[in-house]
Amino acid sequence: MMIASRVIVRGVVQGVGFRPFVHATATELGLSGSVGNSALGVVIDIEGDGEAIDAFVARVRNRPPPLARVESIEREDSPPLGRQGFCIIETDAGAVGRTLAPADVGICDDCLRELTDPSDRRYRHPFITCTNCGPRFTIIESMPYDRAATTMKRFPLCANCAAEYVDPSDRRFHAQPIACPECGPTLSFVEGDAPAVTGEGALLRARSLLRDGKILAVKGIGGFHMACDARDDRVVHDLRERKHRPSKPLAVMVRDVREARALGVVGDAEADAMSSRERPIVLVAKASGYTLSPSIAPGIPDIGIMLAYNPIQHLLLGLAGDAAGPAALVMTSANIGGEPILYSDDDLERVGDLADGVLTHNRPILMPCDDSVMRIFGSGRQLLRRSRGYAPLPVAAPFDLPPTLAVGADLKNTFCLAEGAYVWPSQHIGDMGDLAVIDSFAASESHFESITGVVPHQIACDEHPRYRSSSWARSRSGDRPVRVVGHHHAHVASVMGENGRDGSEPVLGIAFDGTGYGADGAVWGGELLLATYKGYRRLAHLGYVPLPGGDAGVERPYRMALAHLWHAGLDWESDLAPVAACPPREQSVLLHQLATGFGCVDTSSMGRLFDAVSSLTGVRQSVDYEAQAAIELEGISRGVDCAPSRYTFDWVQSDDDSWTADPRSVIRAVVRDLRAKVPADVIGARFHESVAHLVLEWAIRGRELAGVDEVVLTGGVFQNPLLLVRACALLGEAGFTPLTGLQLPPNDGGLAYGQVLVGSSS
Ligand SMILES: [Zn+2]
Ligand SMILES: [Zn+2]
């Protein structure tokens, strides 16, 4: 029977080849009608045989284009109008609404093939893209997503490209950022005051600069990278000096999985993650024949590897037949210290100051976006930074949300906008200690409002009275309510929400991190919370230890070790590593502070306990980057057999009916082992085992008290793979269901999502 149907498809359906796909599918099934974008999503008016329409809808649901995400399909039937043919309706410029802006996508196999095919008209074209790949989020100025709303609008299509753009059978049909050598952007290479070299010459110069052991800045998708030969220790040192980044690990870029396997232990799961369209940096163990500069990831067993994800990077690494150049490049964001990544053409001079030469181009980057970072653990993936490739795609909300902005935390900041069934986490913004980062936060936030269409009616922020993110929220709130959310409550809520829990049943939330402002004014960070979105009860925490001198205690782990020794009633004997590391004058000031409590704040931080043990075992006395002491302790402990012993936390019941796990018993046992000449790696392994067992003991206690067996593991400490894998195994054996983040990081980068959920539940 002939009928007509209106089909409305919602989800990620713009900029992913959806309309061409609809056109091709309808034509194949002999249906007539039209397809267009609207405020509602993709609207398809279609008519023909009823069974063919059923088949059409099934195809849309089950086999959409690779980058599409179909969230819902509505269909309404009516009598046929006798339309002929099928057409694509141009986007109405006034249409705005809940269509989702797409994320940047790594170069696809088809484009890579054309890039290397001398007979293709886009052979060696640095800006080759198609419907299935290329920049999106970083070039979109506004929604709906069309070429005129991207930074590609300044490059009118040539006749050949225009023909592809309107040909429904072409892979570039309605692909917005396409270009070719005739009509696209151009590369240029700048070195000092010399005149710029353009085109293929620019690439040749850039590659010879790298070959000569110099530092190249190269404009990519979300900003400038600084690149150098990853095998050349001298130039890696030089790069670290220019970036003011003494030892924080640097990522390495190679061409493909085969080359990645020469550098790291890349299993199937790691290979899949690396070559996924998001192309994150994947952390893997260094391979046994590791030959890169030892300065790339000093002091740790892992290395971060990413595959080339845009054509410029492939050309830089060289195609078959090109003069040999470095096969592995250090690729790190171009910035100094904690400043935001440089991305704009206005930044060219600063980029030029950092590097020996700059490979740039004239396709503007509108939104900066750092590379994402991931680790595979067990059968799961853990995103440590969710940014390029993921932003600005939303994650699902576990319940219907009012229009909300959550501003996140001050470290590893990301924010979230939310409304209805969606939460949009931003790209990685950075550490809010830097004024330029706060500016970048504000710019990204207003851009996110425009591309999501969310007008927040409330703002959620952290409880910390001195967080810059929180004061930003208060200063911008106007007459909108500001929802203040406890730090660790937000951590737990974030994991609950990602796992689809609606909050009607509480979970046991174990939040281990470095620093979070607690409800009693102490620095929390070793917490067991019985939590729903509406509230929480603190069932247990790590016993308080005085943290002397705030930031100094974080930057110099020996201070934390001395505080733990003092707290445990142990003398500062000179053979102990933290005592030897602390200058005598600093010792006397510290002792005075601890004795009087002056300049000290109580902390239950698990991150600081890792610091103290790292210092005691002589692993790390002062840090150049966050969590360095704990990361290096995990590094030496991994794979070490600590049987049969571990340490135990004594349990103390507090006045308020909660329990504290006393770190003093562990510190005393560590010192006993040191005196007995137990090697540092064995002590480290025993300590990890102890903390994993503490997780289990807390879960058992929580189950006895509340009858709950879902256990959320969250907070930056759970980025520790040894601890996370062991804790999950122990919980599983004891019949618990461990819950961890799926897309959002366990560190403060995942906090804003939890703030949204708690802030919307009061
Ligand atoms: Zn492609
Ligand atoms: Zn062209």
Image (cartoon, rainbow, N blue to C red):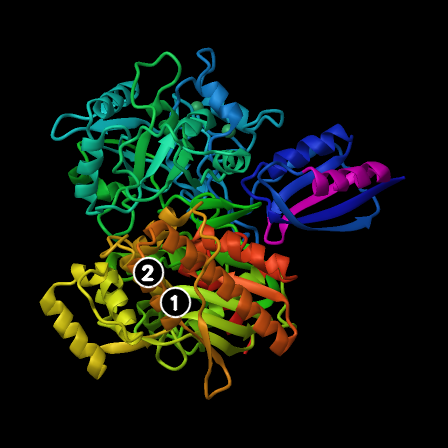
Residue in view at x 47 percent, y 56 percent:
425
Disc 1 and disc 2 in contact, CB within 8 angstroms: yes
Outermost residue to the left = 585
Amino acid marked by disc 1: Val
Magenta stretch contains residue 50:
yes
- Percent across and percent down for residue 290 are 35, 30
**46 sits to left or right of 615:** right
Magenta stretch contains residue 445:
no
Which image quarter: residue 31?
A: top right
- Label 2 SS: helix
Q: Earlier in the sequence, mark 1 or mark 2?
A: 2
- Percent across and percent down for residue 589 are 13, 74
Which image quarter: residue 707?
A: bottom right
Camera-near label (1 vs 2) is 1
**98 sits to left or right of 182:** right
Near-viewer residue (436 or 601): 601
Residue 369 visible? The answer is: no
Residue in view at x 67 percent, y 33 percent:
23
Q: CA distance from mark 1 to mark 2?
A: 9 Å
Amino acid marked by disc 2: Val
Q: Which residues are magenta?
A: 38-63
Residue 703 visible? The answer is: yes
Quarter of the picture holding the N terminus: top right
- Would you name the residue on which mark 2 appears? 613
Point out the quarter of the image occupied by ligand 2. Answer: top left
- Would you name the residue on which mark 1 appears? 666
- Label 1 SS: helix
Mark 1 Cα-neighbour bin, 10 Å: few <14, some 14–19, many ≥20: many
Picture layout, residue 194 above or below residue 221: above
